[in-house]
């Protein structure tokens, strides 16, 4: 089965090559897939505009515009940046958040404070680029709401039924998107995207068929 238009796969920050390849292979069974490079490089400021530019530059090569953005973690933030600023180039979005369960015992005061601030303000407190990138990768409401509220394309946020850490962030993201919906994947737990990449393709087909 083939769906249109082209899918742009945007992985989370710590995704392995094997994980991304498996997701790409699963998606290629239902659509043409682009995998632009959105890795964080260097020690300079971490801004979403840089990887967004790389993605937008790769789209014309596929010969199709607009595209469907499939983002995980950091990739979801990049997808929101593109959809909020170049909405005419986005047909739809399918996103997952990447929150992590952390207890108070293992969180330092500094990290706790960072968790309450937009990632863009963290460098002013002496935060390293790695801190900024990690915060963006968690797809937190404090960061995504200003972008999500500007997105006009249909969007589906997916979360595993057993993924406790991402229930709240996923619901908040879906609610922030004007045409957002939340879908819970039955029996799926943390990291289900890596363990069951075929589910990503199946959910995407259902989502686009219903549009």
Image (spheres, rainbow, N blue to C red):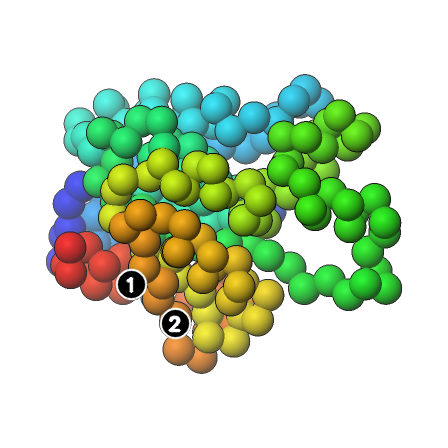
**Mark closest to the chain's N terminus, 1 or 2:** 2
Q: Is residue 197 left or right of residue 117?
A: left
Which residue does the image show at 47% across and 57% down from the upper left? 172
Which residue does the image show at 15% across and 60% down from the upper left? 210
List x then y, in percent, for residue 197.
39, 61
List x then y, in percent, for residue 124.
75, 25
- Is the C-beta separation of discs 1 and 2 under 8 Å? yes
Count of number-bearing discs = 2
Relative to the observer, which residue lies in front, 151 or 39? Answer: 151
**Residue beneath label 2, please?**
185
Question: Would you call the spot at circle 2 few (<14 residues within 10 Å), some (14-19), or many (20 or more)?
Answer: some
Which residue does the image show at 44% across and 79% down from the upper left? 187
Q: Kindly identify which numbered label has been placed on residue 203.
A: 1
Q: The N terminus appears in which quarter of the rendering? A: bottom left
Secondary element at image label 1: helix
Q: Is residue 162 left or right of residue 9?
A: right
């Amino acid at each position: 089965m083939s769906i249109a238009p082209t899918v742009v796969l945007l992985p989370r920050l710590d995704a392995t090559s094997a994980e991304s390849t498996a997701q790409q292979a699963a998606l290629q069974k239902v659509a043409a897939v682009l995998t632009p490079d959105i890795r964080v490089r260097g020690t300079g400021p971490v801004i979403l505009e840089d990887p967004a530019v790389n993605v937008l530059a790769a789209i014309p090569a596929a010969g199709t515009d607009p595209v469907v953005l499939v983002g995980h973690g950091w990739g979801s933030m990049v997808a929101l940046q593109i959809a909020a600023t170049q909405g005419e180039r986005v047909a739809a979005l399918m996103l997952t958040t990447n929150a992590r369960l952390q207890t108070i015992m293992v969180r330092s005061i500094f990290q706790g404070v960072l968790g309450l601030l937009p990632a863009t303000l963290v460098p002013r407190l002496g935060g390293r680029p790695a801190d900024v990138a990690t915060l963006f990768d968690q797809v937190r409401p404090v960061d995504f709401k200003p972008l999500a509220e500007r997105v006009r394309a249909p969007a589906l946020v997916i979360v595993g039924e057993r993924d406790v850490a991402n229930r709240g962030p996923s619901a908040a993201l879906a609610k922030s998107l004007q045409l957002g919906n939340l879908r819970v994947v039955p029996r799926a737990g943390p990291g289900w995207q890596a363990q069951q990449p075929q589910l990503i393709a199946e959910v995407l087909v259902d989502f686009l068929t219903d549009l």
